[in-house]
Structure formats: C-alpha cells, structure tokens
C-alpha cells in the first residue's frame, strides 16, 4: 500500500490557517480528506468553523481535534494514536491535513513521521507556513535587527530573541512552501519588503505564494512530495541538540465566557481597547448576539478584529459567548475579564 500523503499547515496566530483549510475542503475535487486540528486553548473554535463547512470531501467523522495541548509537545500521547486510527480505517483518507496551533514548532511533528508504525504508512507531503503579510509589514512579529544588534553589543550576556521571533523562524525554517496571506491589506512596496524578509529565513528552493483570504490553488498545496521526514537535517531549529522538550511557558491562554451580547459595537470597541492596553496577541471565539439567529465568529490578531456570522444556532446548543484570549506570559487575566464582562452578559442557568 502506498503511503498516505500528509500536509502540515503551520503559521502564527491569526495567519489564516483555518480559512485556507476551508478553501481546500471546498475545492477538494473529489479527494477524500482527513483533518487533524490542534488548538492552543480550551475552546475548539477552529474545529467548529471547519465542521460548519459540511463538505463531503471531509465528513465530520474525519475531523479530529487535539485541544488544550500542543501537538509538538504531546506527539506520543495525542498525535500518534490519532494518526493510527485514521490509517487503520478500512476506507482510509487519500490525504491528511494537519493544522497546527499558532504556537507549535513544526519540526518535532515532522520527526514523528519517523515513528516505525507511521513511517511505512504515511509521509509528510509538505510543510506549508502561512504568514500574515499585513502583520509582518507592521513589524508585529518581526525584530528590528539594528536595535537587536545594539542591545546585544551593550550586554552580550543576554539573549534578546523573543519567543515570537523564534516561532517565526521555526515555522519558516521547516517550510516547503510559504503562503503570504492577507496581501490585499497592504501595498506593493511593503509587501515586497515582507517577501524579502521571508526569503532571508527560508531554505533554498522553497517557494513563496501570495494569497488573499487563504485562496491558493489546491494543486499547489497538495502534491509537493517533499517527504519531509527524510529531510530533517536541512530544516534548522532552535531546539536542535537540546534535550529539553519545547513547551509554552512563554504564553498564557484562557477562556472568557458569557451570555448574549446586547451591544456588539460596544463589545468590539472594548475588545480593541483591551488588546492595545494588554498587548493581547489573539482573541477568537463564538459570540451570541441578542436578536440574531446565527452565531458570530470573532477573530482578532493584534489590533485587527474581524467578525462574521457563520451559521444558525442549533436547537441543541446553548446561546452563549466563549472567547479564547492568547498572549505572552504575564497577561493580566483579571483585568481583561473585568473589561469584557460588562458587554458579554451573564450565562443563562
């Protein structure tokens, strides 16, 4: 039996991974896909969004969520058993897609494909790294090299690389293809500058594709045939040679829950204020808006907040609001919860 090709989709928080996957499912061309979604946080927002597609290419039973634990840190406990279940199915998928959390290191996941029970049955067709071109152009996830060099020269005993910079480098260094997403939000000159910045981080031969709203030809994303698990040495990582496991001690994540939101504009305004005041990296979740029969999806990355109604609330669902808040270590949870509480309302008994 041939190996099942697997595409790993990585990228920073809010880069558009779920939007890209929804596009893939809608343009599968009859391929039978399976999807593993790894989230950082307690609420399965990305899984809910993908399941809302109701696409025949990837039935709900073939969507597996690994929540509240990084896939690169829990390979033996979570990822390997999940892969085995998919590969053991009588009607196994033709292609597996893995969406990592925005905080995951891709290389440990690729290395897991060397596991004896996996190696003979699946292969990493390619690692696709999504980049939020607009955010990088604004310097949100990039470091000023001149300032960094000056700081290091002043105090060479300190390591001034931020966790965000390391994640950015890890994802680009492992990629077989880079998708510069959200290119519709920036002009040609800053986009070219972002492209040059990315080119400096990727391996020779890695292609860069520009995209808006996650729209990329499925033929370009699937069928790279990189066999990445056989090519680990060419993929640089900050954890190479280290015995310690990667963890997420540099980040905080928590859920803010509430009832129906009576004033959506007030909630969004308050959210923007809290994001700026507390340097929140990401807010995502579902909102119940008073008088609306559909649930509202909220996706915030940095100062940019997007929202849309994705589907009607089901009779079996409780109309409540749940938001995942993610930021670097030291987030003032109490202040953020107190700031959101007046707009979220109380949860019905």
Image (cartoon, rainbow, N blue to C red):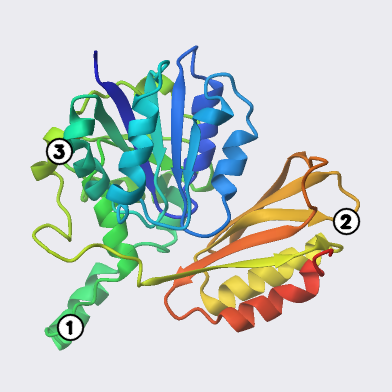
* Residue furthest bottom in the image: 154
Where residue 217 appears, as percent x and y from the top left, is 43, 23
Q: Which residue is mark 3?
A: 204
- Say which mark, if any, is on residue 158: 1
Where residue 290 appears, as percent x and y from the top left, is 88, 56
Q: In front: 109, or 146?
A: 109
Helix or strand or loop: what does disc 1 sit on? Answer: loop
Q: Nearer the viewer, mark 3 or mark 1?
A: 1
Sequence order check, earlier mark of 2 and 1: 1
Q: In front: 165, or 121?
A: 121
Asked if the residue under mark 1 is in contact with the one under mark 2, i.e. CB atoms within 8 Å, the reply is: no
Where residue 177 appears, as percent x and y from the top left, is 29, 35
Residue shown at 25% from the left, 35% from the top: 176
Cα–Cα span, label 3 and label 1: 31 Å
Q: Which residue is mark 2?
A: 290
Where residue 178 appears, as percent x and y from the top left, is 32, 39
Asked if the residue under mark 1 is in contact with the one under mark 3, i.e. CB atoms within 8 Å, the reply is: no
Q: Nearer the viewer, mark 2 or mark 3?
A: 2
Sequence order check, earlier mark of 3 and 1: 1
């Amino acid at each position: 039996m041939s190996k099942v090709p697997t595409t790993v989709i990585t990228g920073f928080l809010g880069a558009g991974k779920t939007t890209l996957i929804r596009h893939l499912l809608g343009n599968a061309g009859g391929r039978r896909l399976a999807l593993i979604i790894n989230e950082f946080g307690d609420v399965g927002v990305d899984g809910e969004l993908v399941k809302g597609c109701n696409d025949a290419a990837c039935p709900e039973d073939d969507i597996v969520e690994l929540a509240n634990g990084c896939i690169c840190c829990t390979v033996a406990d979570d990822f390997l058993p999940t892969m085995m279940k998919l590969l053991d199915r009588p009607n196994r998928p033709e292609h597996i897609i893995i969406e990592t959390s925005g905080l995951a290191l891709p290389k440990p996941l690729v290395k897991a494909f060397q596991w004896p029970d996996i190696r003979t049955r699946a292969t990493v067709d390619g690692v696709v790294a999504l980049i939020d071109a607009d955010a990088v152009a604004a310097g949100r996830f990039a470091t000023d090299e001149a300032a960094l060099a000056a700081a290091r020269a002043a105090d060479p005993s300190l390591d001034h690389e931020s966790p965000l910079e390391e994640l950015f480098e890890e994802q680009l260094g492992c990629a077989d293809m880079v998708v510069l997403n959200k290119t519709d939000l920036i002009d040609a000159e800053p986009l070219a500058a972002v492209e040059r910045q990315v080119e400096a981080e990727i391996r020779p031969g890695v292609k860069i594709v520009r995209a808006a709203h996650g729209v990329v030809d499925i033929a370009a994303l699937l069928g790279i045939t990189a066999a990445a698990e056989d090519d680990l040495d060419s993929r640089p990582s900050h954890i190479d040679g280290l015995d310690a496991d990667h963890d997420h001690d540099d980040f905080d994540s928590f859920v803010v829950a509430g009832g129906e939101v009576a004033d959506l504009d007030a909630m969004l305004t308050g959210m923007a204020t809290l994001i700026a005041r507390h340097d929140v990296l990401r807010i995502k979740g579902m909102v119940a808006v008073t008088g609306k029969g559909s649930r509202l999806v909220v996706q915030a990355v940095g100062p940019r907040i997007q929202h849309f109604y994705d589907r009607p609330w089901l009779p079996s669902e409780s109309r409540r609001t749940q938001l995942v808040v993610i930021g670097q270590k030291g987030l003032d949870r109490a202040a953020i919860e107190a700031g959101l509480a007046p707009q979220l309302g109380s949860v019905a008994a």
